[in-house]
Image (tube, rainbow, N blue to C red):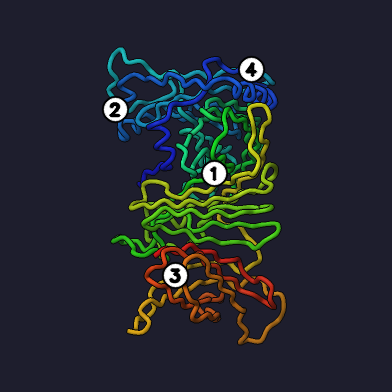
Amino acid sequence: MHHRLPLAGFLSLALCAAAFAEDAPPPVRTFLDLEAYASKLAQAPYVAPDSKMDPFFAGLNYDGHRQIRFKGDKALYGDMKDAYHIEFFHPGWMFKKTVSFAEIADGQPKGVPFSKELFDYGKLEIPEGALYPSGYTGFRLLAPDSLMQKRFEFMVFQGASYFRAVTTNLGWGLSARGVAINTVGGEPEEFPDFTHFWFVQPKPGEKTFKFFALLNGASITGAYEFEVEPGETTKMTISGSLFLRRVVKLLGLAPFSSMFWFGENTHPKPLDFRPEVHDSDGLLIEQQFGPTIWRPLDNGKELRESVFNIEAVKGFGLQERDRNFNNFQDLEAKYHNRTAVWVEPIEGFGRGKLHLIEIPTGEETWDNVVTLWEPDHLPTSTEPLRFAYRLHWQKEQEHKLAKVTSTRWGKAVATPDKPNDHVFVVDFTKGDLKTEHPADWTPDVEIVIAGNPAKLLDKRVMLNTESGGWRAFFKMEIPPTTHLLELTCDLLEDKQPLSERWTYQWKQ
């Protein structure tokens, strides 16, 4: 089994102290209660908690921590039939920061204290006199049994503000975060924590589950409301208010981290038996007033950052389009079966920038791809940034345009007079054609080259008789001194977009 945590999440757990004030929050019954407290907290100095733990539990390694298992029959709400159940995570290994939990029943909050009786400690030999932790480090949410006719864990919150979800058909992959602070821009990155959760007691037969979360960090506080529903597409409606203690270089909404080690477009490829290794293979962007963009992911020698300035975004998300097992050949990790995600903005996503950061990696252990939405407007300690969006954990976001299915490039056959020619091959689906065409008709193709010098030598489109879609290919002369190119490729029908806009950042 491949054990993997988000790169940023690991660093936050290892290097950052948790974030919440010394005073416990007042009773939270509604989101407005929590928003008022987050605003008050933002006007006070940040106080890092004492995260000391008994040396035995603090010193557990990965295998030792895995010995500790939550007892399934002790789940919160476990005595309710056909209802959501909650199981908690025990501190240890790299998970040392504890989180406060409460449940809201009949409008009244009640704390959920730590109890060692909820855990099976396996073969661990716990020293006599060892102090058990004072809290849990996160939780997993289980769907009502009627959904899958079995125990089905579909969502996990653990580590800073990270959370993940799966669907009834797709497995664990990329991770979401509550917020991103200074991920790029030169300032030290911060990792605020979800420090308190309040669960609204579920009722048997309810389709959704609701809970609140307090975010706290050195520069920011926030109040969050989650309403979740698992299924073939697992849906989350997330709304919240953010308050800044101090100005930050970059604030990111709806951030995600994923992993891309290598794919069909990666040169050189590692010496690995698998043709491709990635959780996501591209970023999809839909705009109100602009093209739909597909940006394939890649892994190179240097960090890559792409910034998309958008007037009005309809949606965006990291996708895993390649679902062909033959392109992965991994029976254990099953990368062809990882969930994709789609962000559907509701509030707080006006004009802004969408960032894509690709960090060089030589392995599949750590997440190395980050996306986030940077709003133009920043909050203060008293004037919040209110936001809301829906997350769709799903197989793929659908639309009617021709979709990019693969990206390949390489050196053309070298001749003495043309040693620097490169060929790019981009495959598309057929798309929804607007009119009838002759059997030999092919779309027009438009190629745009920006950045360092390069010369377009040839461009063509042909029917891909194997896939039933289109294959666009173009040849360029790229001088050895050219380091970076920004490339786009559009398929056109009667001068109108037939396809997504393929957008690629190429580096020498």
- Tag 1: residue type? Pro
* x and y, in percent, of residue 292 in the image: 63, 62
SS under mark 3: strand
Which of the numbered marks, if any, corresponds to residue 27?
A: 4
Q: Are marks 3 and 2 in contact (CB under 8 Å)?
A: no
Q: Residues within 10 Å of mark 4 (few under 14, many from 20)?
A: some
- Tag 4: residue type? Pro
Q: Is residue 297 above or below residue 183?
A: below
Q: Are marks 1 and 2 in contact (CB under 8 Å)?
A: no
Distance in Å between CA atoms under marks 3 and 2: 50 Å
Mark 1 vs mark 2: which is more N-terminal?
2
Residue that numbered label 3 is attached to: 408
Quadrant of the drawing holding the C terminus = bottom left
Mark 4 vs mark 3: which is more N-terminal?
4
Which mark's residue is nearer the viewer, 1 or 2? 1
Q: Is residue 232 above or below residue 227?
A: below
Q: Residues within 10 Å of mark 2 (few under 14, many from 20)?
A: few
Q: Nearer the viewer, residue 422 or 83?
A: 422
* x and y, in percent, of residue 82 in the image: 60, 35
Q: Is residue 147 above or below residue 44?
A: below
- Tag 2: residue type? Lys
SS under mark 2: loop
Q: Nearer the viewer, residue 81 or 283?
A: 283
Which of the numbered marks, if any, corresponds to residue 477?
A: none
- Tag 3: residue type? Arg
Which of the numbered marks, if any, corresponds to residue 123?
A: 2
Q: Residue at x 46, y 33 (%)?
A: 159
